[in-house]
Image: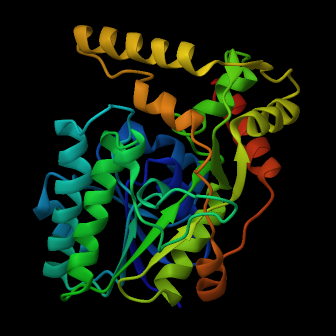
Amino acid sequence: MSGRAVVTGASGLLGGNLTVLLARAGHDVCALFRSEKTVAHLKEALGDAPVRFMRGDLDDEISLRQAFADADVVFHCAAVVNVAPAPTPDLARANVEGTARVIEAVRAARVKRLVHCSSTVTVGLARGDAPADESSPWKFAEHGLADGYCTTKKLAEEIVQKNAAADIDAVIVNPGFMFGPLDAKPSSGKMIVEVARRRVPGHTPGSNSFVDVRDVARGMIAAWEKGRRGERYILGGHNVSYRDVFATIARVAGVKPPRLAVPRPIALAFGAFAQTVASLRGHEPLITTSSVRWSFEPGFRVSSRKAETELGYAISPLEPAIADALAWFRAHGMLG
């Protein structure tokens, strides 16, 4: 299958890697961006690949309609990510209202299919030995984990499901914690940078599903080609503890891993302090009590079996993703 694909959030880690893979596969790709400086690294990675860049804003439905005209598929990757303990105006505007505008633009432009990028934070927690899957109940609030990001992503996903049940051909993907190149902000790759620079003082006993971002990008393309309308597909990776992933990053980076086990009361106290200081200063907090609870939660383990069976999704080893991320960070002066 080939066609005209539009990518929102092309400046981000997933959107950038997805844009590169689509272009290399010969698709007619339109990458949306808000400011020129945010896509300089992507243009560098693309080289001579014929990708069209258009200004597009989730606040501006008219620009979205223009970008989506004649598109076979829209990959909606744009989102705001932060650790705010509750939904903020920015999170709600981008993740919830922005998704609603994307859907209206998809409807107006008569786009054939929407592939919406959600997250594993909208999937339920694992209980017992079995990892969570697409049918697991979402009970994050009961565990003190319903922060602003996961709450708004859950609301956005529900909007997509509602419209898929009506008149929009939409498929939802739920990626895990992604590592790889082209992480200009950096986003999830900040973990790699901090461990490589030996700025992580210790580890917590929680877990997550860590995945090569290029696996997720290939999974999104497969969702376009093979996914069933209205379905969710977890695109996870390796379910490991933070201690183990820190050790893997350190080994690939050639540094010593964090060895201190951080006590939960100390971590929660620090999270509360950082959250209060950020609130008083009007800044986005770097850590909150809810993000601390996440780091101690052993239930962030997911199964990608449905995507493997229906989409042909495949999970690569994690070390190459970390090595390629480190190489990209070094080349762009982000490791000091």
Q: Is residue 260 left or right of residue 175?
A: right
Work out whether 102 lies above or below 170. above
Task: State the residue at coordinates (73%, 48%).
Answer: 240
Q: Is residue 201 left or right of residue 127?
A: right
Task: State the residue at coordinates (57%, 62%).
Answer: 20
Q: How is the image coloured?
A: rainbow
Q: Position of residue 197 (x, y in %)?
A: 72, 18
Task: State the residue at coordinates (23%, 48%).
Answer: 94
Task: State the residue at coordinates (42%, 25%).
Answer: 289
Q: Looking at the rendering, which quadrant does residue 168 occupy?
A: bottom left
Question: 199 or 302, which is in the foreground?
Answer: 302
Work out whether 171 lies above or below 41. below
Q: Is residue 33 left or right of residue 56?
A: right
Q: Looking at the rendering, which quadrant does residue 222 occupy?
A: bottom right
Point out the image quarter for the C terminus.
top right
Q: Is residue 74 left or right of residue 320?
A: left
Work out whether 187 lies above or below 256. below
Can the viewer see residue 141?
yes
Number of numbered markers:
0
Q: Looking at the rendering, which quadrant does residue 164 occupy?
A: bottom left
Q: Position of residue 242 (x, y in %)?
A: 69, 37
Can the viewer see residue 69?
no
Question: 211 or 322, which is in the foreground?
Answer: 211
Question: 15 or 156, which is in the foreground?
Answer: 156
Q: Position of residue 82 (x, y in %)?
A: 38, 35
Q: Position of residue 21 (x, y in %)?
A: 59, 67
Question: 110 or 215, which is in the foreground?
Answer: 215
